Image (cartoon, rainbow, N blue to C red):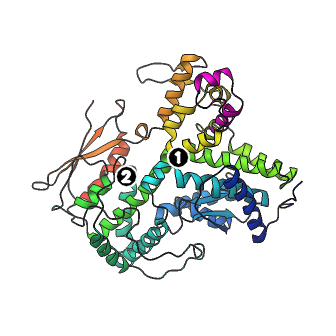
C-alpha cells in the first residue's frame, strides 16, 4: 500500500510538485503520452474571469468586447448563476496551465492531469495543431500584439483602433486559411518586419502574466505572421478567388494605412490560432477528460489518493460528462465532454472486452488489447467530424439515447429519420458527424472580383451550403464592416445553386 500523496483539501506548492510527479509517472510511463514541458500558474477567481474573457489567452490585446464578457461573467458568477473554469491551458511550449487558487488539492490534481497531460498531449500531437499553430512562438506574438495595439491607441486614438478591430472581429470566421498556407517570406523580409515591429515595443508590466517564460526576441517564426511579401494596396498581385477575407483586405484595401493592415494581420493570426480548436472540441476535451479519469483512478488503485478524494473527483467528473436529455431544461446540445469521453472509453472497452457487435463494426479494434495505440493514433490523425464517422459505436448511440430528426423547411412536421437499428446506426453516425463539419456552421464567402482600375467595387460571392441563404440582418451588419475596411462599394452575390 503506497503512502497517500495528500489528505484533506489544503495544498501548498511543495505538495503540488509532489502530486504532479505522481501524475507524470502515470501519464508518461503508463499512458505513454508525449507532452510539452508544463508550467503551472496559480491565479485567483477574478484573474480567471479576466483570462477567459479574452478568449482564454494571456497577454491579449485590449478590446471593449472582452470587458463586456468579463462584466457578464462576473455578474453571473457573483450571483451564483454559473461557475468558473477550474483551469485554462495554453497551447504553447512550455504548455502553461492556470489553476484557480480556490481549488481543493483533489481538484488541483484533476486539472493538472486534465490540462498538463490530456490537453498538452493533444496540442502537441494532433495534425491540425501541428499544421496551423506554432507553440514555440505564440507567447512572443501575443506580447508583440498587445504592445502594438496599445501603441496604436496612443498614437492614433482609441476610437480609430477600435473601429478597425471591430470590423476585423466581425470577419474572424472568414479570416482563416482553411486549406493552404500563404507562401513564406524571405529572411530579409522577415527581418525588415521585425525591425518595424520593434519600433513599437515598450516595456510593460502585468502582474498576472509576469511569470510567462522569457524567450529570444526573434519573432521571425511567429505564426506565419508575414506572408508572401510586403507589397500591399492596389499594386499588389491578386490571386482570386480568395477565401480569407481579412487577408485579402489586409493586402489589397485601397484605403488602409500600414498600422491598420497590421491590426488586421494580428486578428487574422489569432483567428488562425483558434482554427484547429474549432474543429477538435469533442476530441480535445474528450482526450483530456479520458486522461484525467484514467490517471486519477490509477492514483487511487496505487493507494496514493484516499477514498474521500476519489469520491470528490467522481462527483466533479460526473458533472462534467453529464448529458441532459433533449427534453431536459438544461439541454443545450451535445456535451463535447460527454461524447468525447464516452467514445474514448468505449474504444478501451472494445479493445479489452468486445461483444460480437463490436467485432462486426470494429474488427481492427475489438479484442486487440491495444487501446493506447488506437487512442493515440486517433488523437493525432482525426478531427471531430472524421473521429465520429470512424469510431462512434452503436453502444455509445444507445447509451446516449441518440436519434436523428429530419427538419426540412417545406415539411409541416419533424420526422424521426434514424433510430437504434442497423441502417439507423449508420445514418445517425453520418448525421452527427456532419454537425461537426465547419462548413455547416460557417458561410463560404469568397472574394471573386476587385475592380481596382475602375470604380474599385469589391465583389464577394456566397456559395450556399445545402441551399441555405445568409441571414439578412447579419449579412447587412457584416457588409458594413467590409465596406469600412475596403473603403468603396462592396457587392455580395448569392446565387441559388
Q: Label 2 belongs to which residue?
A: 176
Relative to residue 130, is residue 208 depicted above or below? below
Query: Is residue 349 on the magenta stretch?
Result: yes
Relative to residue 200, is residue 132 depicted above or below? above
- The mark found on residue 286 in the picture is none
Q: Secondary structure at mark 1?
A: helix
Who is closer to the viewer here, 348 or 383?
348
Q: Secondary structure at mark 2?
A: loop
Say if mark 1 contacts mark 2, CB within 8 Å. Answer: no
Mark 1: give few (<14), some (14-19) or many (20+) Cα within 10 Å.
some
- Quadrant where the C terminus is found in the figure: top left
Q: Position of residue 26 (x, y in %)?
A: 72, 53
Q: Residue 342: tell me if it is visible.
A: yes
Side of 153 relative to 345 (left or right): left
Mark 2: give few (<14), some (14-19) or many (20+) Cα within 10 Å.
many
Q: Residue furthest bottom?
A: 203
Residue at the spot 19% in from the left edge and 54% down from the top edge: 238
Q: Which residues are magenta?
A: 344-370
Q: CA distance from mark 1 to mark 2?
A: 22 Å
Query: Which label sits in the foreground, 1 or 2?
Result: 1
Who is closer to the viewer here, 430 or 150?
430
- The mark found on residue 380 in the picture is 1
Residue at the spot 56% in from the left edge and 22% down from the top edge: 425
Q: Position of residue 413 (x, y in %)?
A: 50, 19
Relative to residue 417, is residue 323 depicted above or below? below
Side of 299 relative to 467 (left or right): right
Amino acid at each position: 500500500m503506497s503512502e497517500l500523496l495528500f489528505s484533506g483539501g489544503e495544498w501548498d506548492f511543495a505538495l503540488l510538485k509532489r502530486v504532479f510527479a505522481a501524475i507524470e509517472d502515470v501519464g508518461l510511463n503508463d499512458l505513454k503520452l508525449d507532452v510539452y514541458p508544463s508550467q503551472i500558474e496559480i491565479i485567483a477567481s477574478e484573474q480567471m474571469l479576466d483570462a477567459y474573457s479574452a478568449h482564454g489567452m494571456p497577454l491579449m490585446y485590449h478590446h471593449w468586447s472582452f470587458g463586456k464578457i468579463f462584466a457578464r461573467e462576473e455578474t453571473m458568477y457573483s450571483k451564483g448563476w454559473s461557475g468558473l473554469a477550474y483551469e485554462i491551458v495554453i497551447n504553447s511550449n512550455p504548455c502553461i496551465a492556470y489553476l484557480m487558487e480556490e481549488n481543493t488539492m483533489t481538484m488541483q490534481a484533476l486539472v493538472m492531469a486534465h490540462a498538463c497531460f490530456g490537453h498538452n498531449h493533444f496540442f502537441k500531437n494532433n495534425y491540425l495543431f501541428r499544421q496551423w499553430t506554432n507553440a514555440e512562438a505564440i507567447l512572443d506574438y501575443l506580447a508583440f500584439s498587445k504592445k502594438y495595439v496599445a501603441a496604436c491607441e496612443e498614437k492614433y486614438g482609441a476610437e480609430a483602433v477600435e473601429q478597425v478591430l471591430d470590423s476585423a472581429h466581425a470577419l474572424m470566421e472568414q479570416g482563416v486559411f482553411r486549406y493552404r498556407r500563404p507562401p513564406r517570406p524571405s529572411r530579409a523580409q522577415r527581418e525588415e518586419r521585425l525591425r518595424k515591429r520593434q519600433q513599437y515595443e515598450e516595456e510593460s508590466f502585468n502582474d498576472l502574466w509576469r511569470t510567462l517564460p522569457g524567450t529570444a526576441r526573434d519573432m521571425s517564426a511567429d505564426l506565419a505572421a508575414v506572408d508572401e511579401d510586403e507589397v500591399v494596396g492596389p499594386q499588389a498581385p491578386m490571386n482570386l478567388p480568395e477565401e480569407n477575407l481579412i487577408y485579402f483586405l489586409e493586402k489589397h484595401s485601397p484605403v488602409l494605412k500600414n498600422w491598420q493592415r497590421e491590426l488586421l494581420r494580428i486578428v487574422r493570426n489569432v483567428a488562425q490560432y483558434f482554427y484547429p480548436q474549432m474543429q477538435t472540441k469533442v476530441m480535445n476535451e474528450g482526450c483530456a477528460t479520458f486522461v484525467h479519469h484514467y490517471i486519477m483512478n490509477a492514483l487511487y488503485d496505487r493507494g496514493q489518493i484516499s477514498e474521500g478524494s476519489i469520491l470528490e473527483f467522481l462527483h466533479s467528473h460526473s458533472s462534467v460528462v453529464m448529458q441532459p436529455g433533449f427534453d431536459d431544461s438544461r439541454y443545450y446540445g451535445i456535451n463535447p465532454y460527454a461524447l468525447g469521453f464516452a467514445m474514448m472509453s468505449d474504444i478501451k472497452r472494445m479493445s479489452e472486452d468486445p461483444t460480437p457487435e463490436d467485432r462486426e463494426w470494429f474488427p481492427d479494434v475489438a479484442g486487440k488489447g491495444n487501446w493506447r495505440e488506437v487512442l493515440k493514433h486517433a488523437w493525432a490523425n482525426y478531427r471531430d467530424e472524421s473521429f465520429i464517422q470512424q469510431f462512434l459505436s452503436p453502444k455509445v448511440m444507445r447509451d446516449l439515447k441518440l436519434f436523428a430528426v429530419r427538419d426540412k423547411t417545406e415539411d409541416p412536421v419533424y420526422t424521426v429519420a434514424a433510430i437504434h437499428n442497423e441502417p439507423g446506426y449508420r445514418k445517425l453516425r453520418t448525421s452527427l458527424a456532419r454537425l461537426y463539419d465547419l462548413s455547416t456552421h460557417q458561410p463560404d464567402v469568397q472574394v471573386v472580383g476587385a475592380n481596382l482600375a475602375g470604380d474599385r467595387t469589391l465583389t464577394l460571392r456566397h456559395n450556399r451550403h445545402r441551399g441555405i441563404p445568409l441571414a439578412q440582418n447579419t449579412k447587412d451588419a457584416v457588409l458594413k464592416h467590409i465596406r469600412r475596411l475596403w473603403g468603396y462599394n462592396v457587392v455580395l452575390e448569392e446565387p441559388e445553386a
